[in-house]
Image: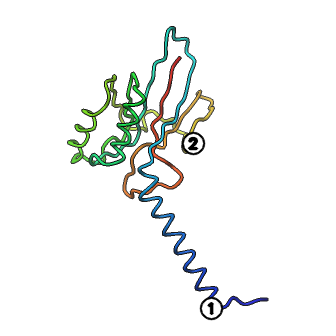
Amino acid sequence: MAHTTKPQRSFWKWAIAFAMALLLGYGFIIEPRWVVVTPLQKQVGLKGGTFKIAQLSDLHLSGMGSVEEATLNHLKALQPDLILLTGDVIGDRHALPALEDFLKSLPNAIKVAIGKHELFTPRSSGRYVAGSYQTAWGNLHVSRGIGTSMIPLRIGARPEIVLLELK
């Protein structure tokens, strides 16, 4: 059985520490600000066009930062007909001025704020983490949301705007 020498062990400790630092830097700095749009389409028999619904979940607004600006830029480019804010829009009541600024900056569309997500998520949905699913109740899409709550860290879960196009 070969023994690892001290310089080799030291190298691996530093390599692991460096990799962890890169991962945490990515999770705290890059991914939380990398807002993506997830397009979904549904044929419903609309005549003469498409009705676009943008869904924003779990904003956890506390101020107008880079994530909020990126979200607004996406929304302005998408030009939805309806914007749904579905649960956890602000972190606490002190964020109401930030919410007012965000709402004033939204593009011209119908805006609807819906309460807590628990009212709209089926009881046994805990196994559905993110993405689209075929379920016994019908099609289900679980959004990754936009913001972060207590720890501003995202790894493998970019902030998401869901764009549902009804045709």
Q: Nearer the viewer, mark 1 or mark 2?
A: 1
Closer to the N terminus: mark 1 or mark 2?
Answer: 1
- Measured as percent of width and height from the top left, residue 133 is found at 61, 35
Q: Would you place residue 99 above or below residue 45 in this image?
A: below
Q: Is residue 8 above or below residue 106?
A: below
> What is the three-letter code of the residue carrying label 2?
Tyr
Tell me which amino acid carries mark 1.
Lys
Q: Would you call the spot at circle 1 few (<14 residues within 10 Å), some (14-19), or many (20 or more)?
A: few
Which residue is disc 2 drawn over? 128
Counting from the top left corner in percent of width and height, residue 148 is at 39, 51
The residue pinned by badge 1 equals 6
- Spot the residue most to the right: 1
Please report the residue visible at 40 percent of the width from the left and 25 percent of the height from the top: 80
Q: Nearer the viewer, residue 49 or 55?
A: 49
Question: Where is residue 129 drawn, in percent x and y?
Answer: 55, 45
Residue at 43% across, 52% down: 32
Q: How is the structure coloured here?
A: rainbow
